[in-house]
């Protein structure tokens, strides 16, 4: 099949409402041989073996990211810089660059993990079920992403701006090449407080995982007070943890009130 025929077929499928690339026939994966299932899962999640060539490519990616991020004098420049960054494979599989939502200059900045399906489709962070829960959590302490007033507004972004396939965890090398952009993003947005939701943003900003131990403990990163919290997607799966999340929300509210 030539390129133009393949492209026309793909466009037709999108027009008909196809949103996921899946096979022609359903596969009952629960009926697969356990060993084969394990091997498939391992192959899908294993980071690429890093030989010398890959290590060079990873170094190059990080230094190009640093250069593009440092050149950005505004959030618009930074978004354009990400658009021009070609080292991250995730970009090729994503529909949209998911940059941010909310008000730049808001007192609170939220850093999530990576876009999911809904975010990829709409080009905005945290718009799916987890995002709706995040909005309700923020509303409980009088914060909102739609506010135009920096005092009660929030600014939201993710460590990765492109959706990983099947929402797999971002790989360390993907986080490393995005970190210069994230750090510049924080500097340009200028929040007073940074909230890290979930393990991936803790890994990126604090170099540590283990959200159950990290959550609720104020620390510092990028020259700012930082609070790690459970990810709203985790809270949807573990509603009993909402109590801890409520404590953390109150802690954010108290910190904001103290800093006034
Ligand atoms: N989870 C995230 O971490 N970010 C999003 O934008 C959506 C879901």
Image (cartoon, rainbow, N blue to C red):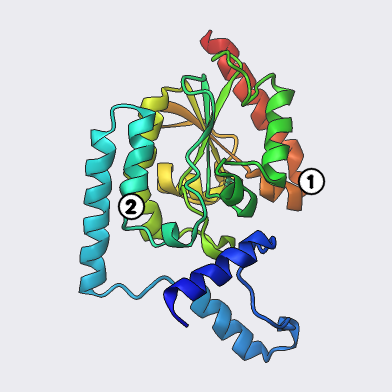
Expressed as whole percent of the image width and height from the top left, the position of residue 193 reads: 49, 24
Q: Which residue lies furthest to the top in this view?
A: 260
* Left or right of 74 on screen, residue 213: right
Depth check: give the residue in front, 258 or 17.
Answer: 17
The residue singled out by tag 1 in the image is 240
Q: Can residue 183 be seen in this view?
A: no
Quarter of the rendering containing residue 82: top left
Residue at the spot 28% in from the left edge and 27% down from the top edge: 73
Residue at the spot 63% in from the left edge and 84% down from the top edge: 37
Q: Residue 177 carries which label?
A: 2
Q: Earlier in the sequence, mark 2 or mark 1?
A: 2
Expressed as whole percent of the image width and height from the top left, the position of residue 140 reads: 74, 24
Depth check: give the residue in front, 33 or 147.
Answer: 147
Q: Say few, some or many: other residues with alpha carbon within 10 Å of mark 2 (under 14 / 14 to 19 / 20 or more).
A: many
Element type at mark 2:
helix
Element type at mark 1:
helix
* Label 1 C-beta lies within 8 Å of the nearest ligand 1 atom: no
Q: Is residue 190 visible?
A: yes
The CA span between labels 2 and 1 is 35 Å
Residue at the spot 69% in from the left edge and 45% down from the top edge: 130
- Above or below for 151 versus 118: above
Expressed as whole percent of the image width and height from the top left, the position of residue 3 reads: 43, 74
Nearer to us of marks 2 and 1 is 2
């Amino acid at each position: 099949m030539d390129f133009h025929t393949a492209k026309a077929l793909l466009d037709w499928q999108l027009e008909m409402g196809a949103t996921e690339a899946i096979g022609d026939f359903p596969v009952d994966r629960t009926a697969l041989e356990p060993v084969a299932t394990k091997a498939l899962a391992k192959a899908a999640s294993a980071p690429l073996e890093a030989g010398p060539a890959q290590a060079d490519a990873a170094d190059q990616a990080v230094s190009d990211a640093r250069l593009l991020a440092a050149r950005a004098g505004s959030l618009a420049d930074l978004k354009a810089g990400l658009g021009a960054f070609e080292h991250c494979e995730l970009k090729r599989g994503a529909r949209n660059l998911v940059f941010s939502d909310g008000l730049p200059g808001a007192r609170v900045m939220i850093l999530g993990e990576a876009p999911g399906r809904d975010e990829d489709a709409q080009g905005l962070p945290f718009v799916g079920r987890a995002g709706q829960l995040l909005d309700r959590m923020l509303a409980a302490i009088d914060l909102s992403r739609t506010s135009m007033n920096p005092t009660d507004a929030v600014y939201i972004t993710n460590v990765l701006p492109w959706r990983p396939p099947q929402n797999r965890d971002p790989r360390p090398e993907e986080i490393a090449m995005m970190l210069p952009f994230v750090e510049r993003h924080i500097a340009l947005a200028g929040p007073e407080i940074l909230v890290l939701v979930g393990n991936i943003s803790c890994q990126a900003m604090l170099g540590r995982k283990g959200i159950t131990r990290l959550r609720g403990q104020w620390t510092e990163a990028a020259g700012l007070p930082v609070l790690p919290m459970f990810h709203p997607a985790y809270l949807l799966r573990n509603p009993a943890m909402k109590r801890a999340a409520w404590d953390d929300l109150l802690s954010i509210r108290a910190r904001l009130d103290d800093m006034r």
